[in-house]
Image: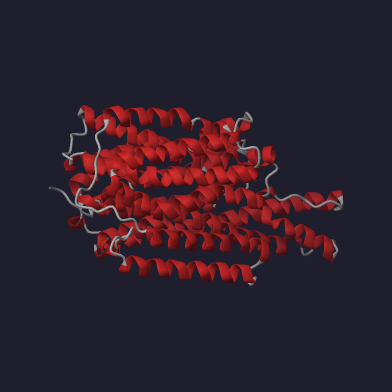
Amino acid sequence: MATVALKSSDGKWIMVSAILASAMAFIDSTALNVVLPSLQKSLNATGTDLFWLLNAYLLVLAALILIGGSLGDKLGRKKIFMFGILIFIAGSAACGFAPNVIMLIVARIIQGMGGALMIPGSLSLISSSIDEKERGRAIGTWSAITTMVTIGGPVLGGALGDAGLWRYIFFINIPIGLAALIILALKVKESRDTNNDEAIDFMGAIAIALGLALLTFGFLRIPAVGMSNWQVYLSLTGGVLLLIAFLFIEARSKHPMMPLSLFANATFSGVNLLTFFLYAGLSSGMLFLSLNLVQAQGYSQLQSGLTFLPFTALMITIARFAGSLADKHGPRLLLIVGPATAGAGLLILSFVKQTNGPADYWTTFFPGILVFGLGMSFTVAPLTATVMGSVSDHFSGTASGINNALTRIANVFANAIFGALAVLFFAGALQGEIKNLPLNAKEKQSVKAEAVNLGNAKVPAGISAKDKVAIELYYHASFIHAYANIMRISAGLGFLGALMSVVFVRNSAVKKDK
């Protein structure tokens, strides 16, 4: 397929359809975090149910997104993109009408299947269709708007959650998806790799899906049963072995969903390592910041969502400019400074203690969010453009799939691993706080058992009024202690991502001309 100019009619329709479809997928991941309290109350969901609501979608998305990218390259990028949108719309409708938490988790799995075909399709269509000299700018525009929607999701989620309308987070996807389908059907031409055959790597897909599922299950079980439980050992061991098996399958397959030869390019390997570390830090940082604001600092769900508006404003104003800078001067410096700045923002946020609520926002949380937003704004567009520019055009869908898969895998692991760590940090701090309280062993055990609920911990029945006040304060202090530790680890992941760029990324490895 001949490439088109970004400002041409064809180029604009490609961008609009890609952005509309991507917006659906990305908004769910952040809006849902904010409405979890409303959803939990409405469906009588447990804490474990909430983790699975987040992870069911991400897990299926991470497991299948590689094959989604490959299918687009082999069978037609537009065709697979549209099929993914249809499945995602169906899953969204099922989520909106779900009568209970089990059905909602099943519907989230359907959403994940659609997203696995849809998300790599959007970037692949841009990369294969837009003229290469403007590709960085095009991807910068895509990154700016989709990340804006991602970070703007909490605002929408907070407003709907406070109004008791959390189901509309899913219903809003239906008109957006239908609009994208109409544009694709009428205005966008098909794009496919004519040199590729149509064989599908089903064994690889099964291995990575089961491997990720077992790892996630193992980490999610740690807070409930402890590290030494056989369920944890078997799940984590089985998950690691299946992921190793996946690499062997890919190395031997004639039609791998993740061609290991792509990683011979040091820049491609480096930006994918950067993606994994940075987005694990981003995911855990946003989740625990949202929980802290609502559960410890006294923000409403809408106020919590509004705190991310500076981040959104920075993405709108800087991300596209950063894409143009990467086109002109190369991405390496931006991919070092950006993640390091984002890590610094998370580190600043880790030092915020108990505040007086939204009135203190500008002197407490705002500086860290500002620095964090600056870092991400200078990173997202160059990162995506570097991934797509470090491989040949006929691997564009596969490269997009690999990079997006690592983003989702990072999110899954961050939710599972950091959730378990947060409970351990919370329990450790609480242990020290309550040791001098005049409680018997059974009462202390029931108080400590609430650690699994983190900021939503409730004082058990039967505790005296005087001790209840003290325990509530200890719960708050223990949660903020856990939050601080998680944010510092998240900051470390941002710095580690910057180090990956120092070591691996080279401007010369990114295509500039045909």
Name the spot of residue 402 as percent of width and height, x first. Answer: 35, 55
Determine whether, in the image, residue 287 is placed left or right of residue 16: right
**Quadrant location of residue 502?**
bottom left
Name the spot of residue 395 as percent of width and height, x first. Answer: 25, 53
Q: Residue at x 79, y 63 (%)?
A: 436
On screen, residue 238 above or below 414: below
Can see residue 264? Answer: yes
Viewer-side residue, 498 vs 132: 132
Viewer-side residue, 102 vs 34: 102
- Judged from this view, the residue extending furthest toward the left is 514
Name the spot of residue 275 as percent of width and height, x first. Answer: 37, 55
Determine whether, in the image, residue 393 is placed left or right of residue 365: left
Determine whether, in the image, residue 444 is placed left or right of residue 492: right
Q: Residue at x 83, y 63 (%)?
A: 442
**Quadrant location of residue 434?**
bottom right
Count of all numbered marks drawn on residues in the image? 0
Name the spot of residue 113 as percent of width and height, x first. Answer: 45, 46
Determine whether, in the image, residue 436 is placed left or right of residue 239: right
Can see residue 297? Answer: no
Q: Residue at x 60, y 46 (%)?
A: 292
- Quadrant in which the N terminus appears: top left
